[in-house]
Image: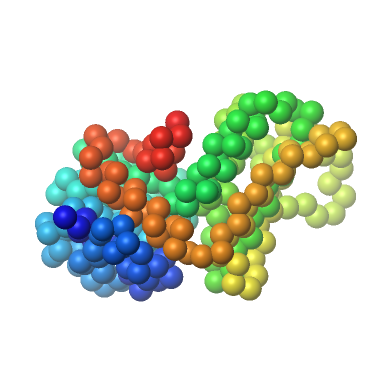
Amino acid sequence: MSLRILLNGSKGRMGQAIIAAAPEQQAVVCAPLDAGDDPAAHIAAVDAVIDFSHHTATLPLARLCNLHRKPLVIGTTGHNAEERAAILAAIRDIPVVWAGNYSVGVNVLNYLVRLATEKLDEAYDIELVEMHHHHKKDAPSGTAEKLLEILKQGRGYGDESLRHGRVGIVGERPKREIGVHALRGGDVIGDHTVIFAGFGERVELTHKASNRAIFATGSVRAARWATGAKPGVYGMEDVLGLR
């Protein structure tokens, strides 16, 4: 039986990619919604909900999903701390997959970055570079934010360690610093590189996306996985068994 999906944000690039990818995953987007549409009119007839809309639309959708006990996949990025806290409070009774990137390859990158951070000590300086198309509105990307969480956790750093770009006479690079660089231009779907720069050697872990279908396929896979999961907040690492 096909997985029935309510898709919030169906007219965007990712929404269109999900609609195209769903049939290959034995799924159907039976409620393609966008701004102004009412998800409450459709939610009872679906098995799962996928959100790739605007950060302000996620909270009311999360509350609706929790009310109807529908699993939710959140692919929207750009939530501030207050919005994220409110969403987490609203989804206590349902399984939710919340990831900055639904690509299988990117989530393997997350796994490898975690491993590298454990094995390479502070003798290796960390820099993160990401690039996206010129239409992208938030920076750093959701994928970069996830990588930064992994890096900070692995090194025991806080947010104060992040250096977003450099300009002027900034002085010698301190040890407890993670450089973050967001590039924007052209039609780049998504490139992410984490650099561990030591003396005499450098380790670079890179993922480059050339087709949005990888994110669409992963989000549908996450939705199917969530229908059999217990209530809780999960990442793609859980979906892929990488934890």
79 w.r.t. 147: above or below: below
52 w.r.t. 80: above or below: below
The image's colouring method is: rainbow
Q: Depth check: 217 or 86 in front?
A: 217
* Residue 195 at x, y percent in the picture: 72, 43
Q: Is residue 157 left or right of residue 58?
A: right
Q: Residue at x 39, y 57 (%)?
A: 217
Q: Depth check: 65 or 49 in front?
A: 49
Q: Residue at x 76, y 36 (%)?
A: 125
Q: Depth check: 116 or 43 in front?
A: 116
* Residue 222 at x, y percent in the picture: 34, 48
Query: In which quadrant will I find the C terminus?
Result: top left
Q: Is residue 107 left or right of residue 191?
A: left
Q: Is residue 88 left or right of residue 42?
A: right
Q: How many marks?
A: 0
241 w.r.t. 31: above or below: above
* Residue 202 at x, y percent in the picture: 79, 39
219 w.r.t. 15: above or below: above
- Determine if residue 86 is in view: no
Report which quarter residue 182 is drawn in.
bottom right
Query: In which quadrant will I find the N terminus?
Result: bottom left
- Determine if residue 171 is in view: yes
Q: Residue at x 30, y 40 (%)?
A: 89
* Residue 200 at x, y percent in the picture: 88, 35
Q: Residue at x 55, y 55 (%)?
A: 141
